[in-house]
Image: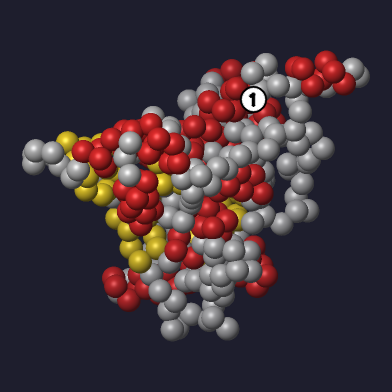
Amino acid sequence: MRSLKRGISLFTTTTAGEYFLGTASRAIRIYTSEQKVIAEHLARGVEESEISQLTGVSPIAVHNLMTELAHQFLIDTSLGSITLSDRFVSKLDNRAIKNSKPNRDGAYIQLHNRIAPELEQSTWIDGVTDGGVSVLSARQNYLVEISGSNRVATLLYTLLLTSGFTQVRFAARGRTSAIDDLDIGVDGMTSSNIGFSFTKNREDLRRDYSLFRLDKSANYLDEASTPDLVIACGDIDPEKLALWMSYGQAFMHIPHPRAGRAEIGPLVIPGKTPCLRCAELAECDQSGVLSHRTLTAYEKLEYPQIAAHAIAALAASQIVTYCDAISLSEGEDLKGAQACGKITIIDYQALAQPQVVAITRHPLCGCAF
């Protein structure tokens, strides 16, 4: 089964009788009426094998066009599916079967609608040939832990849950365990929530936010389970960092913002990719600055609202890229490493123009040993 990927368009060009089939970034040239007819039938969902019978076009012409589309990664070659358990529970088997049918299951219909935009992203990942279903489904398997108490940490929880990361959880908050003034306006929290438990507030929304249904028997706050990735928002305890580096805990650092500038990264796979010390040494080499000391007596290290949403979205995108790469690169030594070795710098005055700085493993850093 081969079909066009979602979002493909037929572009009319300035040359009479010539078209482009694909997207703005990748496309093939259509220059015969036969190819245009084939493309239009593919867009309507007609099976490849039926096009010749319906249109009289040569099967060889259909095959050649599909081969050209496959070469540009513009088609899916398999049909993926997300397996869901029966949601209707009844002591009567016939009633359970009847009410578990997709056309009667409201939750199934809602899931079908909600995953469509996520598949629009995952289907265009290099190497995906099933519409993005397997990659999207695999996100349920990753345990992502968020530590920190700022707005970016709060927003990341929602973004990851709604993107398919069912097992995302919060570690202990540094600032306070209760909702306070700086939480107002972040992800629906209001002044009426002040003083209530932050963790409970977020956990109460897990079922509503989660893209996929939850496992009733699972304890999503189980601290004994080892995360696949830790997102450290703010300062990192040196002892905790040493433990992560020693036992190979993958983590992403999003340091506190300072002087109207925020950073995302690096994402570190200990012993395999550049670490925080590598980043510090690289910055020292470039700037000649050995250390810095804040002169302000008291500084609230928090993001402005607009910047918080922009930075959380960029960070979530990198996290998704890392995990999706692992799902697609089974058996490779550096799974997901293409998301590592870089720091994204965002200036509050130019949020739409982030700067990406590449870093390498520094020869003076001992992370390789």
The residue to which callout 1 is attached is 108
**Above or below: residue 315 compared with residue 278:** above
At x 37%, y 46%, the residue is: 59
Query: Given the current orientation, which residue lies at the most extreme left position?
Result: 15
Quadrant, the C terminus: bottom right
The reply to whether residue 298 is in sight is no
Closer to us: 191 or 156? 156
Under mark 1, the amino acid is Tyr
The tally of labels here is 1
Is 17 situated left or right of 180 in this image?
A: left
SS of the residue under disc 1: helix
Q: Residues within 10 Å of mark 1 (few under 14, many from 20)?
A: some
Which quadrant of the view contains residue 202? top right
**Above or below: residue 288 compared with residue 299:** below
Is 308 situated left or right of 286 in this image?
A: right
Closer to us: 87 or 62? 62
At x 49%, y 39%, the residue is: 119
x, y percent for residue 36 = 25, 38
x, y percent for residue 205 = 64, 28
x, y percent for residue 361 = 44, 76
At x 76%, y 36%, the residue is: 215
